[in-house]
Amino acid sequence: MKYRTLPDSNLQISEVGFGLWTVSTGWWGTFTDEEAIRLMRLGADLGITLFDAADTYGNGRSEELLAKAFTTLGERERIVIATKVGYDFINYGGDARRGQREIPQNFSPQAIKQATEAALKRLKTDHIDILQLHNIRLEQVLDDALWETLDQLKAEGKIRHHGVALGPAIGWLGEGAAAIATRQPDILQHIYNMLEQEPGSSLHRVAEATQAKTKFFVRVPHSSGMLEGKYTTETVFPPSDHRSHRPRKWLLDGIQKVEQLRFLEKSNRTLGQAALQWLLHDPRVATVLPNIYNEEQLREFANTSETPSLIKEEMDQITQLYANNFGLEAEEGRFKGTMSLSELPSPFVERFRGLGLLHE
C-alpha cells in the first residue's frame, strides 16, 4: 500500500480506502456486524488507513461499526476516520430511506454542531479526522455561517479537516466547482471512473486552474461494479440491491465497453486494479473508495498499489475510447445538480471565464 497526504497534514491516507456505505446500509446485500467488522479489520491489516463513513449510513451504523472494529487507542491512531453530516436521519429515518431516496437535510450551524457531537459519541473518539458536508447544494456553498461553524469545530479540536461530498447521484459540477473556487475544502468527494469521466475531470481542472489545495476522494471508481469486469448478460441483481433499479441497457452497454478495456488486464494486474490505477494517476486524488463486499475483492483492491501503473499509451487509448463513447450510440447524460458553469451566479461565471474554464 502507498499513502498520500492532505496539505498541512500528517495523516497517512491509503491510496485505497474503505467506504462503509456497502457494509452498513443494506443496499449491496446484508452484512452482520461481525462480517462487516472482519472485513474492516482485514482492510487495516492490508494497509488501508482511510475509512469513510456517514452518520446517515444505516442511521449511525457505519460509525458504530468503526468504533467496534477499532476499539483501543492504538487501533484508533492507526486509522483515518472520515465521516459526513447534513442529513436529518433522526427525524426522517426508517423504511422510506431504502434505495437511494433522499431525506431532508439540515445544514444549520446548530444542526451541524449537534450532528458532529453525535458522530463523535458513536465513533467513541475525541476527534474526527475529516468531516464532510454530505451532498451540499449551492446554498450551503454560499453560507458563510456554515463554513464558520466548520472552522470553529476545527479550532475546538473536534475535527482536523473538512470537506464536501457531492451527490447523491453523478453530477453537481456547478456546486463542486463553486466550493473549490470559494471555500477550498481540504477534500472533495465525488463519483469518477473510466466510464463516467464527467463531471469528475472538469472538477479536477477547476482545482488546477484555481490553484486550490483541495484533494479528491473518489467514490464509485468501478462504475457500480461494472469495471470489475465480472458482469455478463446473465447477471441478475437481487431486488434489495440498488443496481436492480438500473435499466438493462446500462448492463448491456457497460459490458460492451468493458470488453474494449480488457487490454488493461495483465498477468499482474486485474481490470479492477487498472480502474483504480487510472484514477491514482492524478496526484490530486488522495484516495479511491471501491465498494467492498467480500474478502477476495478486498484483497484484490488493497493490492492495487503493488500493480503496474498505467503507461502513457494505455492512458491515451482510454481517452480515445471514451471520446468516441466506445463506438456505441451516444446517450444523453443523466446528471443531477448544476452541470453548466454558466448557470452559476455571475461572479462565478466571470471568474471561470477568466480562467478559461467556461466556453461559450
Image: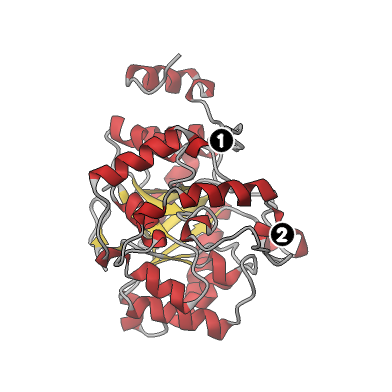
Q: Residue at x 25, y 58 (%)?
A: 4
- Relative to residue 152, is residue 123 depicted above or below? below
Residue 291 in view here: yes
Other residues around mark 2 within 10 Å, as few (<14) / some (14–19) / many (≥20): some
Where residue 1 sits: x, y (%)?
Answer: 27, 69
Q: Amino acid at mark 2?
A: Arg
Please name the amino acid that badge 1 sits on. Answer: Glu
Q: Tell me the number on the disc at residue 139.
A: 1
Viewer-proximal residue, 341 or 137?
341
Residue at x-position 51% and y-position 46% = 166
Image check: 24 left or right of 276? right
Quarter of the figure that contains the C terminus: top left
Pick out the residue farthest to the top. Answer: 360
Q: Residues within 10 Å of mark 1 (few under 14, many from 20)?
A: few
- Camera-near label (1 vs 2) is 2
Tell me, for residue 97, which label it has, or none. Answer: 2
Residue 347 sits in which quadrant?
top left
Looking at the rendered structure, the secondary structure element under dot 2 is helix
Viewer-closest of 154 and 96:
96
In the rendering, at what x and y percent does residue 77 appear?
31, 75
Pointer 1 or 2: first along the chain: 2
